[in-house]
């Protein structure tokens, strides 16, 4: 599978090199499928982020109307509204009415669902709803929005306290484990999230994630 991915990117890998990459990715089918650059050593904890970022860059280049940052901001706006409203697969007809999404956000989300690599619309034309390539891609999008709100000091207590969001909060915590204020909030409001954060942290601290 790693060699097929490399061939798609116009590169050739030996069996030994492919086996090493697969091992570094934990032999994880999702990470192997979306790993895009066999020319550099993979860091399993960053493959999903790099895949999404590459996709946003590609969609921005194709559309010519918005830059990648606009698409990232639109994803965060969508994720924030989904978390607040506790609707993770909203119908398109519903989310178009959400006050937290502007016109530019909706256009960017529309481009992304038409591209279909990260988000897509599932269901019949009168009941189309947001769906994701994989649940872990959905969780990364949600955790990115959580981290952004935490940075801005706007993360609502209702999200911090929600047990259902423990894994999403944990992923966000693992990416910003030196933020003592955020960690303190999780200890107070959602200690289960810290368990998920520990699971996300790499064994090798050299990749910049640090430790909790």
Image (cartoon, rainbow, N blue to C red):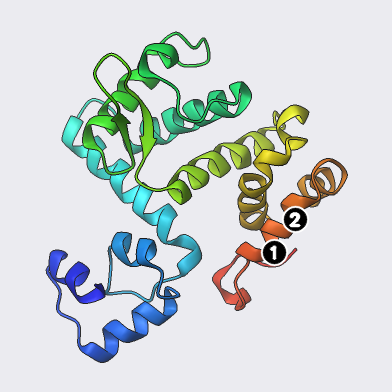
Q: In percent of the image, x 61 and y 45: which residue is there?
A: 168
- Which residue was labeled with disc 1? 198
Quarter where residue 116 is shown? top left
Residue 194: % across, % down: 75, 55
**Can I make out residue 179 in this image?**
no
Establish if 130 lies above or below 53: above
What percent of the width, then of the height, locates residue 110?
A: 29, 24
Q: CA distance from mark 1 to mark 2?
A: 6 Å
| Residue closer to the observer: 128 or 147 | 128
Q: Quadrant of the C terminus?
A: bottom right
Q: Is residue 47 left or right of residue 145?
A: left
Above or below, comparing residue 192 to residue 82 in the picture: below
In the image shown, does 8 or 182 lie closer to the viewer?
A: 8
Judge whether 158 appears above or below 3 on screen: above
Disc 2 element: helix
Q: Residue at x 67, y 39 (%)?
A: 164
Q: Which mark is residue 194?
A: 2
Q: Is residue 16 above or below residue 137?
A: below
Pointer 1 with pointer 2, Cβ within 8 A = yes
Identify the residue at horizontal 66%, vertical 40% (top origin).
165
Secondary structure beneath disc 1?
helix
- The image shows residue 73 at horizontal and vertical percentages of 45, 31
What's the mark number on residue 61? Answer: none
Categorize mark 1 by other alpha carbons within 10 Å: few (<14), some (14-19), many (20+).
Answer: some
- In the image, taking residue 179 as reference, residue 100 lies left or right, namely left
Residue 108 or 20: which is nearer the viewer?
A: 20
State the quadrant of the N terminus.
bottom left
């Amino acid at each position: 599978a790693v060699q097929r991915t490399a061939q798609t990117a116009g590169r050739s890998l030996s069996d030994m090199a492919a086996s090493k990459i697969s091992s570094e990715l934990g032999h994880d089918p999702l990470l192997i499928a979306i790993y895009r650059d066999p020319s550099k050593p993979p860091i399993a904890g960053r493959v999903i982020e790099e895949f999404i970022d590459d996709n946003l860059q590609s969609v921005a280049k194709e559309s010519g109307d918005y830059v990648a940052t606009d698409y990232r901001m639109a994803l965060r706006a969508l994720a924030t509204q989904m978390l607040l409203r506790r609707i993770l697969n909203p119908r398109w007809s519903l989310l178009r009415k959400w006050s937290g999404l502007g016109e530019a956000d909706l256009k960017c989300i529309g481009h992304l669902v038409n591209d279909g690599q990260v988000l897509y619309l599932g269901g019949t034309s009168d009941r189309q709803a947001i769906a994701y390539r994989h649940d872990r891609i959905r969780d990364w999008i949600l955790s990115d929005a959580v981290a952004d709100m935490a940075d801005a000091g706007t993360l609502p207590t209702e999200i911090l306290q929600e047990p259902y969001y423990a894994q999403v909060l944990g992923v966000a915590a693992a990416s910003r484990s030196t933020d003592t204020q955020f960690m303190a909030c999780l200890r107070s409001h959602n200690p289960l999230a810290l368990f998920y954060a520990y699971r996300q942290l790499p064994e090798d601290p050299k990749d910049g994630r640090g430790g909790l």
